[in-house]
Amino acid sequence: MPAYISILLWRVGMYNSEFGLLNKFLVRMGFAKVDFLANNVIAFCSCMVLNLWMALPFMITTIDGALQSVNQDLYEAATLDGATSWTKIKYITIPTIKPIVAPAAVMTTFITFKQFDIIYLLTQQRGYMTGATLNTVITYAYQNAFVSNNYGLSSAVSMLLFVLIILFSILTNHSLKET
């Protein structure tokens, strides 16, 4: 499902302060309704939950594929040698799936760095200002460029983010080669 539609469905269907599914559960359990997008802490946690929900299918598919690629003969040999379940996980499963899962985790981290749509559509979209004043680096650059017309600051922030991502990429690539 496209991210835009997913985010709007979560905003209207899950986080809505009157009719949202989460508030219906809270009321049924005897708690008061919560405005999930009204203040920064709850809005940040709500954005984080949505971000995790959107990244989950990719990570599950990647981990499932990595687990299916583990040679079952290694487990049989470890069982014959008297290895426990934890020993098999530590010495067979983790080292075998690490070359597949580590780059996927790095890609997910990079996607989170450039996360604009979740913060903007949940808390800052015109006509739906929620009261939360959340900003990520990308939304800060957007506000400076297109709301305040401060293109110089926006460009500087964007270039700084670009340099940080490149450095993070180099460091991560270097650490993955060492293992």
Image (cartoon, helix red, strand yellow):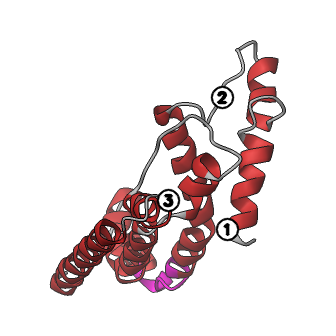
Front one among 146 and 93: 146
- Left or right of 162: which side holds 21? right
Q: Position of residue 46 (x, y in %)?
A: 57, 42
The residue tagged 2 is 35
Amino acid type at circle 2 is Asp
Q: Which residue is mark 1?
A: 3
The spot of residue 37 in percent (x, y) is 61, 37
The magenta segment is 66-74
N-term mark: 2 or 3: 2
Task: Give the vertical position of 172 relative to 136 (above or below).
Answer: below
* Quarter where residue 9 is shown: bottom right
Residue 87 horizontal/vertical position (percent) = 32, 62
**Element type where label 1 sits in the image:** helix
In the image, 74: left or right of 11?
left
Q: Earlier in the sequence, mark 1 or mark 2?
A: 1
Residue, far front: 149
Structural crowding at the residue carrying mark 3, measured as other residues with C-alpha within 10 Å and reported as few (<14), some (14–19) or many (≥20): few
Q: Where is mark 3, residue-wise?
A: 147
